[in-house]
């Protein structure tokens, strides 16, 4: 493992040993991308997998008319600017915080400016790109985060709450 962040087994809460193997229950997790990406979840909900594998994002954007694309630019820019302003006002970069980005998708360069960043997402595909940006990426469900309690200085997320099933 090339990352200094502490990981715990999502099943039993014990710290990982060498090679991504749990010291207590013996579960083994796959390290990918030279130790910057670990997969602690094999199954992915069909809905989330379909969003990426069937090019859902591309189809949604391609079906827009030119006028719709043009008028959506200020809306997207405005939302992006407000998010950035919010994060900048709440995270102090002088402290070099440890940040967890839940449902990180392709990540945000802004967080890397502040300190050590770990990204977590249920879909594996975007994490291959995100691990080039973040210190560590974890393929896992947000309901079984493989880190100790109170480990992070900040836990951030964008556009995540709308994807939580009602029964959770």
Image: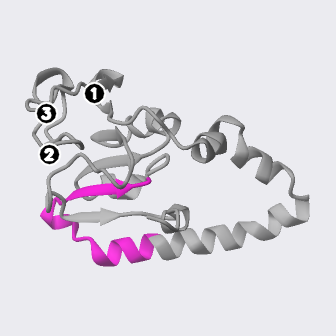
Pointer 1 with pointer 3, Cβ within 8 A: yes
Q: Residue at x 83, y 49 (%)?
A: 62
In terms of secondary structure, where does tag 1 sit?
Answer: loop
Quarter containing the N terminus: top left
Q: Which mark is residue 13?
A: 2
Residue at the disc numbered 1: 29
Magenta includes 97?
A: yes
Separation of disc 1 and disc 2 at Cα? 14 Å
Image position of 137 (left or right of 43): left
Image position of 133 (left or right of 67): left
In terms of secondary structure, where does tag 2 sit?
Answer: loop
Separation of disc 3 and disc 2 at Cα? 9 Å
Image position of 51 (left or right of 13): right
Q: Earlier in the sequence, mark 1 or mark 2?
A: 2
Residue at the disc numbered 3: 16
Q: Quadrant of residue 5?
A: top left
Q: Nearer the viewer, residue 155 or 162?
A: 162
Magenta includes 162?
A: no
Pointer 3 with pointer 2, Cβ within 8 A: no
């Amino acid at each position: 493992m090339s990352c200094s962040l502490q990981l715990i087994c999502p099943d039993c809460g014990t710290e990982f040993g060498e090679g991504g193997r749990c010291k207590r229950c013996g579960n083994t997790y796959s390290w990918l991308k030279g130790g910057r990406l670990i997969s602690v979840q094999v199954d992915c909900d069909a809905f989330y997998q379909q969003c990426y594998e069937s090019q859902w994002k591309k189809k949604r954007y391609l079906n827009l008319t030119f006028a719709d694309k043009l008028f959506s630019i200020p809306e997207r820019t405005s939302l992006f600017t407000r998010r950035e302003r919010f994060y900048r006002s709440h995270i102090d970069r002088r402290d070099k915080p440890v940040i967890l980005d839940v449902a990180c998708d392709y990540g945000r360069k802004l967080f890397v400016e502040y300190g050590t960043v770990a990204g977590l997402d249920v879909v594996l595909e975007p994490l291959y790109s995100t691990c080039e940006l973040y210190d560590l990426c974890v393929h896992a469900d947000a309901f079984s985060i493989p880190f100790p309690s109170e480990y992070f200085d900040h836990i951030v997320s964008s556009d995540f709450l709308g994807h939580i099933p009602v029964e959770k």
